[in-house]
Image (cartoon, rainbow, N blue to C red):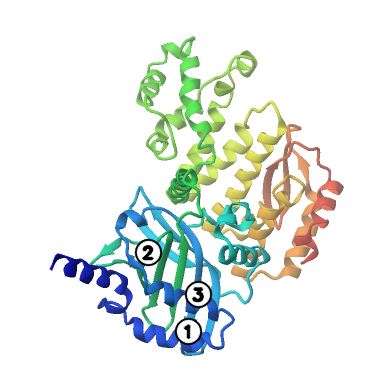
Amino acid sequence: MKNLIYLLLFTTQISFAQTNNSIDFKKIETQALKIAKTSKYGDLIKSFIADNKATTQITQMGLIKDYVGFGIVINPKNNSTKLLPAKYTYDIKTRLAAIGVVDLDKQELTAKQLTYLSVYTKNPSALEKDEYFREFKYHAFTDETKLENAGEMTLKDQNYNTYFTIKNNLLYAIGMNKTSDEFIFYEFDTKAIPNDDYLLIQMEKNRKVKWAEQSKLRDVFPLYHDVRIDEIRTALYYLLREEPYKSDKKLMEYAQNMRQKLDRTTIRKFTTELDYFLDLKIDEKAWKFKSDEVLNLKHTSAHALADIYFGNANYKLAEKFFLRSLLDFKIFSAGGSNAQKDANRIIYDLSKVYEKLGKTDEMMGYLIPLLNGNGSISSATELLNTYIEKNKIDKKTFKKQLDASFNTLDNVRNDGSYTFIFNGKVIFFYSVFNKTESSFAKEVMETDFYKSL
């Protein structure tokens, strides 16, 4: 009797795909074998069907790693098949899984992908040397969901219900499209990815999640000096050791308010403090060899205020403090590249401020200096083209306005601060390079953007 029970259990396991209530394997088998007769992947399809009949159910413990393999996408309606790289992923931190093929909509796979599929189908143990595999093992999908166990391990995402079984070191899965007759046969070699790589894969997932979170924060709480911002506390520490600063009760109070590390979220509470720092009298010559943090206190504060007000949609105040950080409180840097990058970012953001304020001339004008050999040509070109299309700006008219502006260049302070007149509006910018009317015009005229007008 006991032997009979064991036999029944064993029979149930090996015939999982045929007997479970969630999938009609007989129907799938019939459709797949019919298509296999004319498909160039016919042997793989037949092999999958034969192997799947001898698989056993897999536990959740067998699905807590990432696996690479292939997927055969079968569409009975148009009698088509596609062989594609496939990946199963599991995030230990979130306990969410995903499965899928890549580049289903592409007409042709890349040479690297074709080589990967050739290596995998012939000898998966040789994948470690494959170039595509070394990148693909880190691939992740956005459509992640929880595994379900209702008699068999199942993954139900937005488009497919996928059912898993296993045979030795090969993981098999069948993905059923929720809205059509299409289905996918998956095979994954569980030994293809070395055990030592799983930690690296999880670390990469964590990094991507953190980057995504930071990207959301950057959109909501813009802050160019997100790394430098905590140097404000360092500057205050140095200042409060000396007179007249250590006798300044208001400064002492504001410094005490900033006991915790400053970042793009916490700095937003301190607009009053940042504004106060701008009025401090700081002898630049005295601090030149003592503290860069003190020398940059006003610039960092003004630039932070501009970013904060821009993020709060207070565009008039954002304009005010962007201009002050550009003209009144330039960043101190031993090399010119940091100063130029900072100035470029300010005038780029000023363009976006004027877009919000509906000032089209300033919106366009502040991007012109970025075409002038200062290292931001591509970003300026992209935004200019976006503005032209969005605001239906006539290119010929814009070109005439641009040409007329070249002869208005003025070095207003002999400190790298320049102005020019664009369609009657004064535009400010900074350059570590000396500019003349002729060089200003020449550099802009040589750009692909100007030639496209």
In this view, the residue in front, 307 or 318, is 307
Question: Which residue is the site of mark 3?
Answer: 72
Going from N to C along the chain, the mark reached first, 2 or 1, is 1
Left or right of residue 89, residue 416 in this image: right
Residue lying at 69% horizontally and 58% vertically, measured from the top left: 381
Rendered image quadrant of residue 99: bottom left
Rendered image quadrant of residue 358: bottom right
Question: Which residue is the site of mark 1?
Answer: 75
Residue 267 to residue 221: above or below = above
In this view, the residue in front, 368 or 334, is 334
Q: Secondary structure at mark 1?
A: strand
The Cα–Cα distance between marks 2 and 1, rounded to whole angstroms, is 24 Å
Q: Amino acid at mark 3?
A: Ile
Left or right of residue 376, residue 259 in this image: left
Residue lying at 36% horizontally and 49% vertically, measured from the top left: 92
Going from N to C along the chain, the mark reached first, 3 or 2, is 3
Q: Nearer the viewer, mark 3 or mark 2?
A: 2
Residue lying at 40% horizontally and 62% vertically, measured from the top left: 98
Q: Position of residue 333 (x, y in %)?
A: 66, 28
